[in-house]
Amino acid sequence: MVYLGCHLSSVGGYCAMVETAKRIGADTFAFFTRNPRGSKGKKEDPQDAARAMEAMREADFGKIVAHGAYTMNLCTADPEARAFAASVLEDDLRRMALLPGNYYNFHPGSHVGQGEDAGIDYIAQALRKALAPDYPVTVLLETMAGKGSELGGTFGQLRRILDAVGDKRIGVCLDTCHVADGGYEIAADLDGVLAEFDRVIGLERLKALHLNDSKNPMGSRKDRHELLGKGHLGLEVFQRIVTHPLLQGRPMILETPNELPGYAAEIALLRSFIKS
């Protein structure tokens, strides 16, 4: 079994997101913990969170995937900006304690000329500190396209971050557009990519997926999402993903350039592959 969903607005609160997810045929969802291009977090509502957790249990939802702000760069060269990003991470994980057992996903960051070693060290320092309070959340490093000085564009870089942190509460979210843009032949050789992921990182660390087609060919390092079947990956790979025996039980989140009706249609399409 897989769990299918998309990014939803958190404006109405957690319970509202659960109801929206059910309305479009989803049994998981993703949401931003704060403005994705800013830093302000929504006021916390423990009662709403508790009701949402109960509603998800009743509806047999999979784990949900919170997403950190795009502007949170844990390995920037600016010490003040780096410290601020680390404080945002700490606050986000504290907030996620209201949704125990779920996932918090973020982009590892860009080292902006400092080098891979320094960037990984900064990310690991921030994660070790943020995870120190033992919050009931699993943190996911997202696979990236590798544009510029972006870290996470290879499985090897993600492995180095995991090793540097040394905490089993850290996993990986695999983004189909990103890994293809990063040079992995996911459309032509899904099994080969999964075998490489298992060899380098371990499939037990693969906790969630982002399902996105790509506007650009493999290896472009562009990171431009496209509707399922409308890009360079094609529709067949998504059918293989949702039915693959090694990927069952994981939340699969759509981040295609869509509105709710489009997400509902893509979720229905993916479910039709599972039933066929």
Image (tube, rainbow, N blue to C red):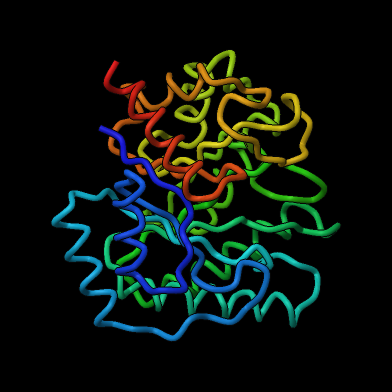
Residue 248, quarter of the rendered image: top left
Q: Position of residue 113 (x, y in %)?
A: 86, 57
Q: Position of residue 199 (x, y in %)?
A: 48, 27
At horizontal 25% and vertical 32% (from top left) the residue drawn is: 1
Query: So how many labels did they put on this image?
Result: 0
In the depicted structure, whether residue 236 falls above or below residue 213:
above
With 101 as the anchor, is 126 left or right in this view? Answer: right
At horizontal 70% and vertical 65% (from top left) the residue drawn is: 75
In the depicted structure, whether residue 260 falls above or below residue 66:
above
At horizontal 37% and vertical 71% (from top left) the residue drawn is: 96
Give 82 or 4, whichever is nearer the viewer: 4
Q: Position of residue 249 (x, y in %)?
A: 28, 37
With 190 as the anchor, is 148 left or right in this view? Answer: right
At horizontal 44% and vertical 36% (from top left) the residue drawn is: 265
Residue 231, quarter of the rendered image: top right
Give 255 or 263, whichever is nearer the viewer: 263
Q: Farthest residue toward the front?
A: 261
Give 12 or 154, whichever is nearer the viewer: 12
Q: Quadrant of the C terminus?
A: top left
Q: Farthest residue toward the right?
A: 113
Q: Position of residue 119 (x, y in %)?
A: 71, 59
In the depicted structure, whether residue 140 falls above or below residue 132:
above
